[in-house]
Image: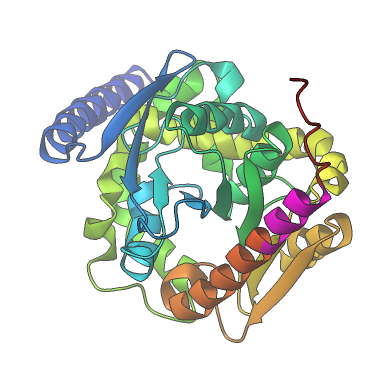
Amino acid sequence: MMTIFLVAVAGLVLLAAYTRLRSGRITRRLTPDGAFATVDGVRLHYHFLPGIAEKPGAPVLVFLHGASGNAYDMRLAFEASFRGRAAALFVDRPGLGFSERGRAVHRSPDGQARLIAGLLEELRIDKAVVVGHSLAGAVTAALGLAAPDRVRGLAFLAPVTHVWPGGVTWYYTLAALPVVGWLFVRTLTLPVAERLAPAAMTNAFSPDPAPHGYARSIRLPLLFRPESFRANARHIHDLKGALTSQAPRYPGLTRPALVVTGTEDAVVWPSIHCEGLLTDLPDAELVVLDRAGHMLHHTHTQAIVTALDRLVLRVEADDREEMQDRPAALPQPA
């Protein structure tokens, strides 16, 4: 029995040493190339692409990545389509990519949304169309609720927005635990995740293949670092409980919205989340992409870009109506 215990301890020590070594190499090799802003004590990493000077009042497209990713995922999908014709902001959500994880209050969709709302204020972005993929669908909705005057449109791509039956994958629950989770992410998650990542990508992109060099392009190893993996696990583990109180507030999201889903999405349940949004949101357009999986922003990019262009036109029409409905200013006394 003692021999087994010693072997187990030695194995954990070796795994911890490997994790520390690999994490250090990842951190040294993959360095930030965007800008930083500190909001509520949290340092957020982002990339901002300016729009064209001829459309100064056009809304900024704010792209939010899903779970197990970072802003490079959304950049890879959309930067080429919007560069030079629309202003775009790509944000690393708290704890992922190069953004700090913040405090416990920043783990929920609402907490993340308030940080991003602060970033929009910091960057003086007064009109935004927020585009969230997967878990970031919940953050997109929370951002619309937290900053209704600033967020003029919402786009949900293969979103998670409503409570679903069941729980989450066991290793996210384990990694989110207070003490055991701390040990788990510093010993087992990195070597295992490195080896299981190809199969996970295949499942997420199915029935289409992942783009060539996808993992390298989005700097996927950043996720394997202990603190990033733990932050991601906590976001996923806490999500269902957060949506219990958040989802009933969705009818208050009156801005134009877009909901995009794929017929072959095997990661989230469109029948729960997309249909729930269509029921709750008073001004939502549904786009169903035939034979599209969960990563539809990469496999069906042009169809989504076209739908986003329509959404921006709806937002601009909405803004014009608001301006017309405002009462004229009273003349000032001489």
Colour scheme employed for the rendering of this structure: rainbow
Q: Which of the 4 image quadrants contains residue 113?
A: top right
Asked if residue 283 can be seen in this view, the reply is yes
Is the residue 184 above or below the residue 159 in the image? above
Classify the position of the C terminus by image quarter: top right
Asked if residue 69 can be seen in this view, the reply is no
Residue at x-position 34% and y-position 45%: 48
Residue at x-position 59% and y-position 40%: 236
Q: Residue furthest bottom?
A: 290
Q: Which of the 4 image quadrants contains residue 153?
A: bottom right
The x, y position of residue 187, in whole percent, is 32, 29
Is the residue 51 above or below the residue 29 in the image? below
Q: Would residue 46 be found to the left or right of residue 110 on screen?
A: left
Residue at x-position 29% and y-position 19%: 6
Instruction: Give the residues in magenta.
Output: 317-325
Q: Which of the 4 image quadrants contains residue 84?
A: bottom left
Q: Would residue 118 be found to the left or right of residue 223 on screen?
A: right
Indicate whether residue 101 is drawn in magenta: no
Indicate whether residue 320 is drawn in magenta: yes
Q: Would residue 105 be found to the left or right of residue 274 on screen?
A: left
The x, y position of residue 265, in whole percent, is 61, 72
In this rendering, the count of numbered labels is: 0
Of residues 261 and 50, the one nearer the viewer is 50
Classify the position of the N terminus by image quarter: top left
Of residues 253 and 176, the one nearer the viewer is 253
